[in-house]
């Protein structure tokens, strides 16, 4: 039966994911940072064309920067502040923007990242990545990579809040668009996230994925998994998520060891085989709109969506309560009118007595009787 293929497909996907855990590693001198091909001491203030670094606060200011890759080396808490339009390009086996430690990208500017020979464009190595405060980032990758990784990635948590992030992953090789190796991924309030990927799109290899907020919109189109979360996936509080996968053998939204929770959110999933699967699927203040009669069912050791005995490949989930189906009206039998019988034909040649004739005869008889009585009375009076 087709629903049995869910468990097999899920197992294959899980095996592929764990066999392709990112292995990016870059050698560096802990006290040296590189900006646009030049080395600087990371413990001292320094600056160049359209950039400036504050060593005390570990903050790099980009003010219209347009140059090659930036490696901030080892920083406890590194911050990049964007002002105006900035572009970082890497044609080497180095991310466009790299730090060993926690990295925060912020500001009201724009950052364009492009790589042609590296799997990652933005990487917080051994740390977390935070993107927020209204900044806009585009990450583009092309070429071929022999190492695993994600175009935008961190080894710890990834947080995107109040930002616009566009990821275009055209790299040939294992990996994907946006991911965390050992932490959770948070896509929070007022965020617009768009990912296209030739492989996987949004992944948390060891943790969970959280998408929330009425002004949060996530749009994903990937060849492989659109969303992979090893543990839980939560799409809540009015978020809008639209995901699509082109693979014929995988699951679009997949949580092998956790629960898929959708609460008060709009989710559209388009796939070729299995729309979503996890240990559990929970809908709160949300319902399956298309196909309307689909059910959440346990298949082998996974939970998925079933409609008419088949695994659902595409689904639309709307916020709110499912509308009550309009009952089909029962047809009523329209009575057949009984034809009025035509009056019997009368025979004009036959003699028949009518009531009028009877009344007339009675009146005649009464009149004659009255005349007779008067005549008799008159004759008697003459005799006396």
Image (cartoon, helix red, strand yellow):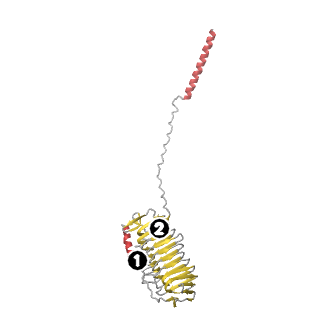
The residue labelled by disc 1 is 17
Quadrant in which the C terminus appears: top right
Figure quadrant of the N terminus: bottom left
> Which residue is rendered at x = 60% and y = 16% of the image?
373
Q: Position of residue 48 (x, y in %)?
A: 56, 89
How many numbered marks, from 0 up? 2
Nearer the observer, 57 or 146: 57
Can see residue 115? no
What is the CA distance from the residue labelled 2 to the residue labelled 1? 24 Å
User: Depth-wise, is mark 2 or mark 1 nearer the camera?
Assistant: 2
Relative to 201, residue 54 above or below: below
Instruction: Confirm whether residue 107 shows in the render.
Output: yes
Q: Secondary structure at mark 1?
A: helix
Secondary structure beneath label 2: strand
| Relative image position of residue 309 (x, y in whole percent) | 39, 64
Question: Residue 133: where, in percent of width, then height?
Answer: 55, 77
Give the mark nearest the N terminus, 2 or 1.
1
> Mark 2: few, some, or many residues within 10 Å (few <14, many ≥20)?
many
Crowdedness near tag 1: few (<14), some (14–19) or many (≥20) residues, C-alpha within 10 Å: some
- Disc 2 marks which residue? 262
Badge 2 vs badge 1, beta-carbon distance below 8 Å:
no
Q: State the image coordinates of residue 378 (x, y, percent, origin top left).
A: 63, 13
């Amino acid at each position: 039966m087709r629903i049995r293929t869910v468990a097999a497909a899920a197992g294959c996907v899980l095996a592929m994911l764990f066999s392709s855990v990112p292995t990016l590693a870059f050698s560096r001198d802990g006290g040296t940072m590189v900006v646009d091909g030049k080395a600087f001491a990371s413990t001292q203030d320094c600056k160049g064309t359209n950039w400036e670094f504050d060593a005390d606060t570990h903050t790099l200011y980009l003010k219209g920067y347009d140059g090659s890759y930036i490696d901030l080396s080892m920083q406890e808490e590194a911050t990049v502040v964007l002002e105006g339009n900035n572009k970082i390009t890497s044609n080497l086996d180095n991310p466009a923007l790299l730090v060993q430690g926690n990295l925060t990208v912020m500001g009201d500017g724009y950052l364009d990242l492009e790589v042609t020979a590296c799997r990652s464009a933005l990487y917080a190595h051994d740390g977390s990545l935070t993107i927020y405060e209204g900044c806009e980032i585009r990450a583009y990758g092309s070429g071929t990579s022999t190492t695993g990784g994600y175009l935008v990635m961190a080894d710890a948590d990834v947080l995107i809040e109040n930002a616009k992030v566009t990821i275009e992953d055209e790299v040939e090789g294992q990996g994907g668009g946006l991911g965390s190796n050992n932490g959770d991924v948070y896509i929070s309030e007022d965020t617009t996230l768009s990912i296209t990927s030739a492989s996987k799109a949004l992944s948390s290899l060891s943790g969970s994925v959280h998408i929330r907020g009425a002004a949060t919109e996530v749009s994903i189109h990937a060849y492989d998994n659109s969303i992979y979360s090893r543990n839980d996936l939560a799409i809540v509080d009015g978020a809008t998520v639209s995901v699509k996968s082109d693979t014929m053998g995988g699951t679009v939204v997949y949580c092998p060891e956790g629960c898929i929770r959708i609460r008060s959110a709009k989710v559209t999933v388009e796939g070729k085989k299995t729309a979503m699967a996890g240990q559990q699927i929970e809908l709160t203040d949300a319902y399956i709109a298309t196909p309307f009669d689909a059910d959440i069912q346990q298949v082998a050791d996974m939970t998925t969506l079933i409609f008419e005995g088949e695994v659902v490949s595409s689904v639309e989930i709307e916020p709110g309560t499912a509308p009550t189906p309009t009952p089909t009206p029962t047809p009523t039998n329209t009575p057949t009118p009984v034809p009025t019988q035509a009056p019997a034909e009368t025979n004009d040649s036959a003699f028949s007595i009518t009531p009028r004739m009877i009344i007339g005869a009675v009146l005649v008889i009464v009149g004659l009787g009255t005349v007779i009585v008067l005549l008799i009375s008159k004759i008697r009076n003459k005799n006396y």
